[in-house]
Image (cartoon, grey):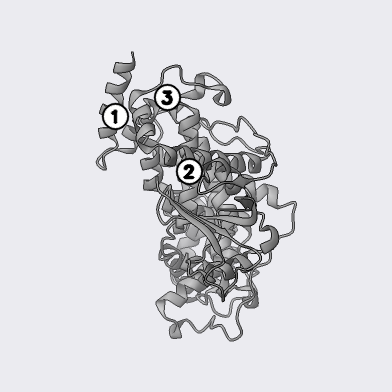
Amino acid sequence: MTGNVRRSGPPWSVDLLADLHAGVLDPQDEAELRAAVADDPEAREILAALDATVADLRDLPPIPVPREVADRIDAALAEEFRRAGASPAPTHQPAAEHVAPVVDLAARRRKKQLGWGAGLLAAAAVAVGVVVVSTQGTPTSDPGDNVAQPTSNTPVTHRPLAVKGNDFGPVFGDVLKAQNYGPLENQDKLAGCLQGANIASAKPLGVSPITLDGKDAVMAILPGGKPGAFKIVVLDPDTCGPDNPNGVLATSQITP
Amino acid sequence: MIETSQGSADTLFRVTAAASSDADLIAAHAAGDPHAFSELVRRHRDRMWAVALRTLRDPEEAADALQEAFISAFRAAASFRAESQVTTWLHRIVVNACLDRMRRRQTRPTVPLPEAGPGEPVAPRDAMAERETRLVVQAALNELPEEQRAPIVLVDVEGYSVAETAQLLGIAEGTVKSRCARGRAKLAKVLGHLRNQSADANVPMSDVQVQQGRQLEER
């Protein structure tokens, strides 16, 4: 373009001045154009507009990650750590088959202290992990020098989800990975049932029809308000609604 | 052997303290500290979320991309090479996860954005509160073609250098600059900084989704 810069204006095209502004031009063209537009009020106005645009973009506020997204990631990472055992260094062998040969005592102690809750968290993480893997599909680009590829895909099994008493542990993982409102049909109806029971409504992390002590019900897992925490709500789909405070068959709070 | 393992784990727990550098956390993670990677994620997830959401525009897709990226990073962290900055490395994984999704999405129809409410003020700028200005800026950004939006989000919104952005996106620095130039020219017009310009840098004002911007900001 050398030599053409002088002939390209005025009036100057916004694209040419945007190239100048962004440093796209080679040094000689840039020097020529800067000299040519130095005393041109219209060109200076365009450059100032581009500066103002960049300032607007720079002033966009941060967007904090929503709690439910942070919860999902925490649960998925907890599962990754569990799968890798006490040594999350799987690159020398396939991650999916990696089993730590030594059980870390501290990890075992923590697990013992946490008891059922820890098992539940692991179950939750399994479910979230499955969802992640199944949505990855085929990578279409090199994701980076050190980036591992997805290594496994666990099939989702379907079986009747039966709960007895307050023992939600065995079905927790299956419910968490489901988005099946069953007889409640959709999120709006679920929200109505939660509202009737005066339970803060949120998009469920997982929802599925179950049986509770043999009775048909719908179990929803809601964010628990902090990482690794969940709220379980079991609803009676025949009676629950915004006007019925007694449509909830059971609730349970899971904390990490 | 088990005793050794326990001892090192206890030592590593202390490494997770707030004062640790990102590189310390990666090393602690590789050595088996169960909290190190979570701490690393906590440090970076807000900025990563902003990049993912502004790049992909769809919260569900952004959440999937972020989770996928952090799991990839978790698995790869043991082989992380210390010569590159942890932040750059982590961001590259997130950006790649977003780009993969954008490429896959190009085969599907674009998800329609919510309708802007009637009478939403797009202009004049002088009459806008600061918050409204930001909504309009975000909405205008959402309307850019993806190939221009991604470099502008990284360079102008998130403050990466052109060189870093080129590395993150896997394109030449000159391409980053020219795509930023095209995008800024469009935005300057949409945002009302450019008056009476007949350039082809023209995004119809009616397409600017103020409502979408508001939803993003309230997250």
Using the image, name the chain to which the residue with label 3 belongs.
A
Residue A29 location in percent, x, y?
52, 54
C-alpha separation, residue under disc 2 versus residue under disc 1: 21 Å
Horizontal and vertical percent for residue B1? Answer: 33, 13
Query: In the rendered image, which residue does mark 3 sit on?
Result: A87
Q: Are marks 2 and 1 on the same chain?
A: no
Q: Residue at x 70, y 61 (%)?
A: A183
Rendered residue at 69%/38% (across/down): A157
Query: Residue A165, relative to residue B25: is it above or below?
Result: below
- Three-letter code for the amino acid on which mark 1 is drawn: Leu
Do badges 3 and 2 share one subunit? yes
Q: Secondary structure at mark 2?
A: helix
- Residue topped by disc 2: A75
Question: What amino acid type is highlighted by mark number 2?
Answer: Ala
Closer to us: mark 3 or mark 2? 2
Residue B155 in percent (x, y) is at 47, 54
User: From the viewer's perspective, is A147 left or right of B6?
Assistant: right
Q: Residue at x 63, y 41 (%)?
A: A136
- Say few, some or many: other residues with alpha carbon within 10 Å of mark 3 (under 14 / 14 to 19 / 20 or more): many
Q: Quadrant of residue A94?
A: top right
Question: Camera-side residue: A182 or A57?
Answer: A182
Disc 1 from disc 3: Cα separation: 12 Å
Q: Which mark is residue B12?
A: 1
Residue A210, can we see it?
Answer: yes
Q: Quadrant of residue B11?
A: top left
